[in-house]
Amino acid sequence: MEVQHFSHEEHPLIFVEELENDGENEVVCTGCDKSVSGPAYRCSQSCTFFLHKSCAELPLEIQHPVHPNHNLVLVAPEEEDRTCDACLRLCNRCFAYQCHSCDFDLDIECASASWPTKRDDCHQHEFVPIFQEIQFTCKLCGEDWSGDAQVCLVCRHLAHTLCALKPRSIKLRANRHLVTLIYSLGKVFKEHDHEFCSCNLCGRKVNLKYAGYYCKKCDFVAHLKCAHDNSIAPSDTSKIMADRHFLTLIYSLGQVIMKGHDDVLCNLCFTKLNLKRAGYYCHQCDFVAHLECARKNSIEPIDTTYSSDSSIESDVNEDIYLEEDEDREEVKRFYHEHKLILSRNEVEFDHRKLICEGCMQSISAPFYSCEQCDYFLHSTCARLPLKKRHPIHRHKLTLSATWDFTGGLSSCNACRRLSHGFAYVCHHLNCDYNMDIRCCSIPKIFRHEGHRHPLSFAKSSAEMCNACDSSERRLGTNGAVFVCNECVFAMDFECATLPLKVKCEYDPHHLSLTYTIENDSEEYYCLICEEERNTNHWFYYCVECNFAAHPRCAIGPYPYIKYETNFTQEDGHQHPFNLSWRTKNSHPCDACGKTFENETLEGETSVGAMGLNCTQCKSIIHWDYKCIRKLEEKLLSTY
């Protein structure tokens, strides 16, 4: 049987069942440069050309895990030196697999060896330190760098020392699962048909050419740096009293400390370190310490509740709904004692008096109403899921409509507004997190009229809101905002949930939320508080009347509170109170005698403040325990 082989095009090859060495002349395989015995191929003419059967039948093209981006092509021996990039041995005297575009070579022995092929795409080879300063682009984070580096000799990847030593899996405060280091995010997201993705922590776009941390269970992805900043200290890190950062356990300190620094001292005991041994190291401030010294100075870890998944609810991500996602003619809900009837007709009378009990906004069709009492609910609010997950909080949240706070109010941790209505609360042990349904209903990626690009949710960001420049409002969210991947723009929850149109008593028309200055007058004032407006901030505006106002002046600091609702103040006044909005021109407080100006709960400047109204005593006081006690003292003194 004759075959034609690419490595010996002059003559065909003949198959021989049993080829043996001929006396003193050793028969050597041209493919692997080893002795031939057993089944083989030889030249049909007088050439001394032999191939093992296995070498002759090698595939002409392969895909290999050590060079996954391109196919490797089988090439014949050549005179010019060629080195295998896996074992670093010369391989020009035998067959090899080659990538012509990358100048990558792999001898057939290394190509046939058993290599890890696990599909998590985490790097499978050792990084080796380069003990000299070089300029390069880190293959893992994509940053240009001049300094120390680590190299993978198999993949020819250069990386920062910090990136090369990243742990394979870490625990984050923002995610209930362990996240895994993926060296090629593009492969993961290509399988999921994602054209692009954004970091679940900062909201910025993730370059899929580089590495990142990923959770397959919940499709969570984060930049290397974001994940590191949000991580919970694992067992191979230590927090010590002498340094403000976490120290990382390095198994060979010579990997991170440059050559030429032979006399390196421990920053705790000030004795010489053996760089061949392990120690604790901080890359940010070049702090290094013996194992025993670091452990003696370590601080007891705090975040132990985050390290165990046993305290976390089920991994099921789906929201739990009451029923099918469609409007039914009649429904019964746990938060109202009567049946609710669907109406698809628009409200024909004064809609300002009809407020949805769920979102506390003006009612519009379709909506549900109660025939027995004054209760209205948007159909979308009636179909809210009973349980919901939100990336801002690690536990599942439960829909609730009742509150223990004064006046039946809840305080949203996302926008920090007090409001009546529905909210999602966390019932997990020792967790007191809640989020109103307006904030909880914003998608992870959404469009807003105030910005031309889509906005993505960012779990942890230092950026200030472009609509109001406020960072104080985000204290309860730990930096959660919505950011733009196309330009530098961020929006907090309070501005993201501002109504697009509002009605206020100072103008006969609706005011529209406006994002750029209304004219070129160079004088911009709020016509309610009469203070100057920041031209970069959003405001409400009426074109017909040329009326402009701060958002908080137009809608008030408590736009979602249902006034005139009676409630009893425990350990306070003997009669029921109701909430009443008071202005600086209203009658002063009947308890302390002061006006209601600048008396909001947040301590912010306002044209008015919340008051407590007792109709039986005919008294209106500040919403403050001191004023409640003073009112009681006054009433007792009159008896």
Image (cartoon, helix red, strand yellow):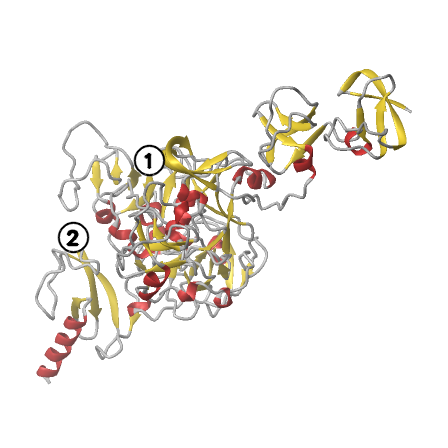
Q: Mark 1 = which residue?
A: 488
Between marks 1 and 2 in the image, the one whose residue lies nearer the viewer: 1
Please say whether residue 221 is visible from this viewpoint. yes
Q: Mark 2 = which residue?
A: 605
Residue 576 in percent (x, y) is at: 26, 74
Image quadrant where one finds the C terminus:
bottom left
The quarter of the picture where residue 32 lies is top right
Q: Which residue is at the front of the view, 71 or 488? A: 71
Q: Residue at x 65, y 25 (%)?
A: 92
Q: Amino acid at mark 2?
A: Thr
Residue 360 in percent (x, y) is at: 36, 56
Q: Residue at x 47, y 70 (%)?
A: 337
Residue 245 in percent (x, y) is at: 31, 54
**Left or right, 164 with reference to 288:** right
For the view shown, which residue lies furthest in the bottom direction?
A: 639
**Secondary structure of residue under mark 2:** loop
For the view shown, which residue lies furthest in the front direction?
A: 24
Residue 83 in percent (x, y) is at: 59, 29
Q: Residue at x 43, y 55 (%)?
A: 172
Q: Amino acid at mark 1?
A: Val
**Left or right, 116 with reference to 4:** left
Image quadrant where one finds the N terminus:
top right
Spatial separation of the CA atoms under disc 1 and disc 2 = 29 Å
**Secondary structure of residue under mark 1:** loop
Q: Which residue is at the front of the view, 408 or 376? A: 408
Q: Is residue 213 above or below residue 72?
A: below
